[in-house]
Structure formats: C-alpha cells, structure tokens
Amino acid sequence: MTPQRTAVPPAVERVQRADARRNRERVLSAARAQFAANGLEAQVDDIARTADVGVGTVYRHFPTKEALLEALAADRFIRLAEWAREALEAPDGWEGLCDFLRRSAELGANDRLLSEAMAERDAFQGAQRERDELMEATAALVERAQAAGELRPEIGAQDIAMLMCGLGRATGAGSFDHAMSWERYLEIIIAGLRAPGSSQFPLPPGG
C-alpha cells in the first residue's frame, strides 16, 4: 500500500518558501564575498560557513559549484549591462564610454570572479544570455564613441571586455601587487583606445 503524503498547510508552506529564499540569498551573498576574494578557487565549505548554513543547504539551491558560479556571473553581467545602458544616456558618447569603463574597472578590481568569469568562454554557459545583453550594450557604447570620432574605429565590444578582464586580473583582489593603481592603468588603456589626433589627458600618479 503506497503511503500518502501529508499535505503541508498553506501557512507552513509560505514560511518554508520564505526560509528557502532567505537561505538562497545568504548563500549567494556569502559566495559573492568568497569568489570576489578568491576567484574560482573559493570552496563550497567556506561559502556554507560564511552563510551560516550547512553544505547540504548550499547544494540544495545550487547542485554544483558551476551552477553557483553561473548565478553570480549572471548577477554581475546584469549589473554591468545596466551601467552600460545608463552610460548610453550621457550627452557625450566618449565620456559615456569612459564612465562605463571606470565603473567596470572599479568593480573588477575588487572582484576576482568578475574578471575570471568574463575571460571564460565555456564555463558560464548558464549566464550566456546575460553576457550577451552586456556585450550588446557595450557594442552600442563603442559605436556611439566611434561616431563621435573619439574611439579608434577598429575597436569592438569584445576588445573592451578583454581589456577590462585583464585589468581586473592585474589589479584585483589577490593580485601580485596590491600597490598597483587600477585608476592609473585604466587611464593608460583609455589613452590607447582614443582615436589618433584626439585630445589627451594626464595619467593619475603611480601607486
């Protein structure tokens, strides 16, 4: 005889769902901190300990480490895409692009996951839609800055993504030299992106 499941009262089910949502957010928050500091080397045990939940709770929400990484990468890509779209509203196309680069660089300098995720071609397939939206918004910024005659015509959105990735790896958390100034090296990148003959600006001092 097949045992029948006991129905869960609606009020109890609502509480369980609320608890599950809170646990999921705690796991994501802890994972965000761990991966920001340690990149892809972050461990699930450390994430669970930081979130004050059991390892089983982490795996209940995210069956694999890759699934957790994809959720975090998607979150970062969404934020960057929002910034890119905001930058499109700037009156000046070049300044809009530069503002986006500066916000992106600051985020990448403090988040190893972001830099490593943007460099991966295959590891974050679950966040591909969000990444595509970011690249689309970045491409629009690039085209607008090129139309203003300030950005080199041979530059594409993928170039921007890889430059930001490289800068984040060089100056981000866990890099070989914390004295490196992301602001200085970003301005070097920006100077290299400028179309020949456009005006130049002095670099920030070295770290």
Image (cartoon, rainbow, N blue to C red):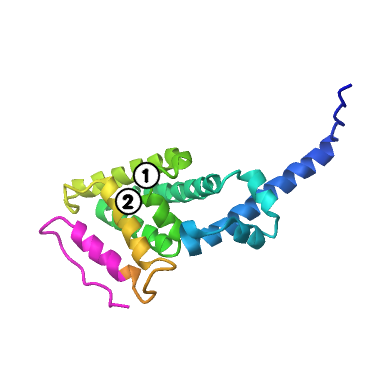
Residue 53, quarter of the rendered image: bottom right
- Foreground residue, 1 or 61? 1
Q: Earlier in the sequence, mark 2 or mark 1?
A: 1
Count residues near mark 1 (Cα–Cα under 10 Å), then give few for <14, some for 14-19, many for 20+.
few
Q: Is residue 52 above or below residue 129?
A: below
Residue 41 in view (yes/no):
yes
Residue 89 coordinates in the image, percent (x, y): 35, 48
**Residue indicated by mark 1:** 121
**Residue indicated by mark 2:** 161
Residue 171 coordinates in the image, percent (x, y): 36, 67
| In-image side of 130 versus 2 (left or right) | left
* Residues rendered magenta in the picture: 184-207
- How far apart are the alpha carbons under marks 2 and 1? 12 Å
Which amino acid lies under the numbered mark 2 shown in the image of this protein?
A: Ala
| In-image side of 32 versus 106 (left or right) | right
Residue 91 in view (yes/no):
no
